[in-house]
Image: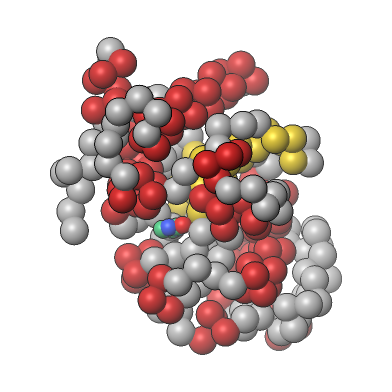
Amino acid sequence: MSNSDQLNLFDDSSIAGNSEFSSLELIPKDPKIPIPSGTYETLETLTEHCQQCQRCELGQNRTHLVIHRGNPKASLMIVGEAPGQNEDEQGLPFVGKSGQLLDKILASVKLDSERDVYICNVNKCRPPGNRKPTSSEIDACKPYLLEQIRLVNPKIILLTGATAVQGILADKRGITKIRGQWFDWEGRFCMPIFHPAYLLRNPSREQGKPKWLMWQDIQEVRRKLDEIS
Ligand code: URA
């Protein structure tokens, strides 16, 4: 595939509109009480536990909890912000327009979103009106994300957008400053990248524009994946 063929995949015009808590009742409702690392033996137990979660108010209005999609054995993990309407309806992350673009971005470097990647979000429940999750909602849900990372054990983590950066790296610099850079986070390669929703709002593929920068970043991710595999 030529460079321009691969960049064409970014075209979004076709996109249509050992448990500490052995009992589920024991999930600490107070988000200030942490859920310790090692609480869940499997992603299934984590999911079952999250179904009961009311650590923040987002739990009251969810249609579906949104935990993950993709391959739990993948070396590459992608972390988004929180479910939107489509995700809340289907119970899967990144299945709306942003998700369709994300799949195309991955396909541009021959990565299949079901086979090669594990996809999840910082927050597991949809914030009303798709607002950004608050810091306390992020903190309340963070133990689940940390357990997902421990259980999936990815070599590379991509953080899509500012909320994912806030959830993991706690770096206050803007995403445009730090995207495309590798960070060492607990022995894993971690890279902030633009959120696909931002690319949908900025469709130009000109050199230096967000879509072009994403193309540079995803090629670097592919290179790193090949290098460490
Ligand atoms: N945006 C996100 O950050 N996550 C999703 O799952 C969908 C849209």
The answer to whether residue 175 is seen in the rendering is yes
Of 57 and 198, nearer the camera is 198
Query: Which residue is depicted at the point 45% across and 71% down?
Result: 131
Q: Measured along the vertical axis of the image, is residue 221 above or below residue 1? A: below
Q: Measured along the vertical axis of the image, is residue 93 above or below residue 50? A: above
Query: Which residue is depicted at the point 50% across and 68% down?
Result: 132
Left or right: where 19 falls relative to 62: right
Query: Which residue is depicted at the point 78% across and 69% down?
Result: 35
Where does the image place residue 141, in percent across and percent down from the top left? Answer: 64, 68
Left or right: where 163 falls relative to 65: right
Of 79 and 170, nearer the camera is 170
Of 171 and 128, nearer the camera is 171
Where does the image place residue 207, in percent across and percent down from the top left? Answer: 35, 25
The answer to whether residue 73 is seen in the rendering is no
Q: Quadrant of the C terminus?
A: top right
Q: Quadrant of the N terminus?
A: top left
Tell which quarter ligand 1 is in.
bottom left
Query: Which residue is depicted at the point 55% across and 45% down?
Result: 175
